[in-house]
Image: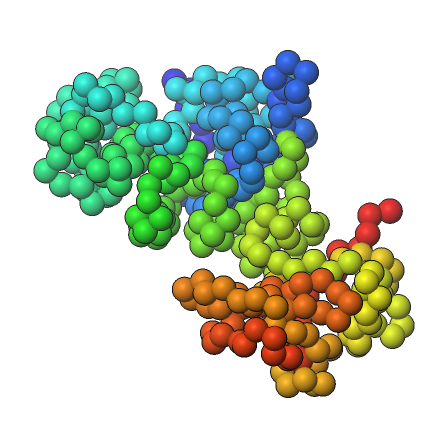
Amino acid sequence: MVETRSQQAETRGCEVVIDGVSKTFGKNAVLKDINITIRPGEFFTLLGPSGCGKTTLLRAIAGFHPINGGRIRFNGDDVTTLPAWDRNIGFVFQNYALWPNKTVFDNVAYGLKLRKVPKTQVAGRVRAALAQVELHDVENRFPAEMSGGMQQRIALARALVIDPPLLLMDEPMSNLDARLRVALRHELRTLQKRLGLTAIYVTHDQEEALEMSDRIAVMQNGLVQQLADPETIYSRPVNRFVAEFVGSANFMEGAFDETGFLLSEGSRLQIAGRQHAGRGTLVVRPEQVVLKECGHGLFDAVVEDRRYMGKAWAQGLRLPNGPLLCVETRTALDVGARVGVDFENFTFLPAEA
């Protein structure tokens, strides 16, 4: 096995450089000149809809898919042509890929046996890996006897037992119920930080990505649309796709001039002090909408509908000669009531030339 600098370094996490990586399947370009540097110890998420290229990129990093162009480096070492089994990575699959006819012990120990770790060390390392994911006294059980959450932990223990500096995860919680996903993603984030691993995580779940990640790459059609920390991705999306995919948003088409923003429907918003000009789209998150008394906001609106969402009421406000605006409030508004509307903040996306 080739020894890379990541195995020699004192720091646990591995820097991953994706340099101009491209991948095609037949005539279909799945990855198009991807350039990303993932920092040591970072929890980095590839986020996007099905078919955007995120899983293909993860598998290229793992060595499962040969790439057609570009280079991949771990801590400065070129691993582009290195076989997957020589890259010293942990990989957690979407379906966990556990052997049903092997015990939990044998499933977790598999990577150690491939690496010819002495038998005297295997049992201790397996128990230690299971303890890291809070599983105890399960070594002799079979995966089919375990819940979905426990199977996910077993798959994670199998990835961790080889002591990798880099952990790759392909939608590992997509098969779990919503409540269990929320609990496990907090545990996974805590474990990753405690161990100091670099983690690259693939998901289409925006909430999961925002909560767990240090940084997120939002992908579409084989391209990175935006790469930033979660707050920037959510609060300052660079284009409509990112704004629509990550969280709920209101979109208002129109143009800025010296007196404000003229909606395409004809209404004018007296938004002052903004350094914007020309045609484009206002992006306003529901929680950025501020309700006031009539006549004390940018405009008055009529409550057209309301829906109870548990944490808040989602209200639909109809602008005069304008679109329906979605607002989140803690209390319900009466349908038909008139309210003043202001914006605490917004993002302006200039129209493409």
Residue at point 68%, 16% (across, down)? 27
With 303 as the anchor, is 159 left or right in this view?
Answer: left
Residue at point 64%, 79% (across, down)? 338
Residue 296 seen in the current view: yes
Residue 320 position in % (x across, y down): 75, 71
Residue 223 position in % (x across, y down): 66, 35
Q: Quadrant of residue 334?
A: bottom right
The quarter in which the N terminus is drawn is top left
Residue at point 53%, 40% (across, down)? 46
Q: Quadrant of residue 119?
A: top left
Classify 101 as above or below 35. Answer: above
With 182 as the anchor, is 350 left or right in this view?
Answer: right
Residue 344 position in % (x across, y down): 64, 74
Classify 231 as above or below 22. Answer: below
With 260 as the anchor, is 336 left or right in this view?
Answer: left
The one of 4 and 19 positioned closer to us in this rendering: 19
The one of 215 and 3 positioned closer to us in this rendering: 215
Check the image and name the residue furthest to the front: 336
Classify 198 as above or below 350. Answer: above
